[in-house]
Structures are given as structure tokens and as C-alpha cells.
Image (cartoon, rainbow, N blue to C red):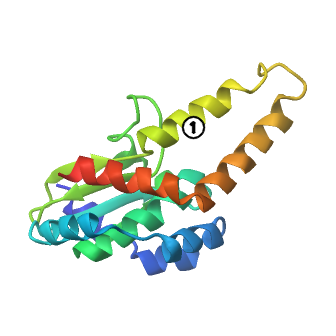
Amino acid sequence: MLHTWFEKGATFEQYRTDMQVNQQEMLRVYEQVSFSTEDEGFFKELKQRKWRGIVLTADWCGDAALCVPIIQRMAEESEIPLRYLIRDENLELMDQYLTNGTSRAIPIFIFIDEHGAETRVWGPRSPEVQQLVTELRSTLPNAEDPTFQEKQQQMFKDFKAKINHDSTIWRTVIDSVVQRLK
């Protein structure tokens, strides 16, 4: 059962305090994300389920800097306690939730019922964010190109800036998570 993993995890406050990378970006999203009246109604429904959540993440991950604060706020509104596990310290669990069966992509949110059974899983990105990443990667030169690393670093920088400031992207995460949790 997943109950043991939940118990092992850190609270959001502990995770946030221990962050070495992306803390400011994550807090910015956490403080600025807002929800619609429709979202609030759904959160009230979620409260009745008495779920908990396990989050596989790492502070260096740009996707986590976007998704963790949004889903943490959604969980707070829904009274769903979340516990945070660092991916590379919990590979036994991570390897059960590989993206496309091969990738240790994070963050992964595992929602469990009061008995510790998995109910839903979401992550690592909304479909719209995945499309954005795919489009950005398509502009990169071949990996053997001498400018590849430089252009890849610039792409990551641009991506990070966009996802941490564009509330329309935040909305895609909210909508994707709501759809998955329904």
C-alpha cells in the first residue's frame, strides 16, 4: 500500500524550506495562482473523498516549480494533505510511475484513498505544456551542432520564464488536474 510512502514524505513547508533551486519561482506561482468559482465548487466535492497525495519531485525541476505550487494550492482548497518525496531518494516508488514506461519525469502526483490505495495519478505536465516543450525542442539544432548546448540552455531559460509568469499556462495545469481527478 502507498500509506507508508505518504508517511515517509515531507510536508509542503518542509519541502519548501529545504529547496536549494527554484524556491522563488515556486513561491511566486504559489502566491499568484487563482481559481475560478467552478474550481472552488470542484474542490468542495473533492473534500468529501478524504484523499491524500504523494508527490515525487525535486527542486531543480522546472516542471515542479510550475506544478507543485498550483497543485499544492488546489490540495489545500480541497483539504487533501500532500507529502513530498525527492525522486532520486525514492527510486523504488518512482520506477512504478515512469512516464511512457521509460522516463523518470517529475513531478508525479499520486492520490490515495483513506486506506492507502491509489485512486488517481497526474503528471508530469499538462498536455499544453508538453506541446510547448515539444515545439521548443523542435527549434534546437542537432545534438552534434556546436551551438546545441548554448541553444538548449537558452531554451530552458525561456521555458522557465514563460511557465513561471504566464497564468494561461497555470490554467492548463489546473484544468488538466481537475479533469484527471473527476
Q: Is residue 25 above or below residue 181?
A: below
The image quarter containing residue 147 is top right
Residue under the image location 78 percent in, 42 percent down: 153
In the image, taking residue 17 as reference, residue 127 lies left or right, namely left
Q: Position of residue 90 (x, y in %)?
A: 42, 54
Pick whichever, 35 or 24, lies toward us. 35
Residue 74, x across and y down, in percent: 33, 68
The answer to whether residue 2 is visible is yes
User: Does 146 appear above or below 155?
Assistant: above
Residue type at mark 1: give it: Leu
Please identify the residue farthest to the front as the structure is shown. 37
Q: In the image, what residue occupies the spot 27% across and 70% down?
A: 37
Q: Position of residue 45 (x, y in %)?
A: 13, 67
Residue denoted by label 1: 132
Outermost residue, right direction? 146
Residue positioned 16% across, 66% down in the render: 46
Residue 16: image location, x then y, percent: 52, 75
| Residue 72 higher or lower than 124, as above or below | below
* 151 vs 11: above or below: above
Q: Give the quadrant of residue 72.
A: bottom left
Give the quadrant of residue 174.
bottom left
Element assignment for label 1: helix
141 left or right of 169 in image: right
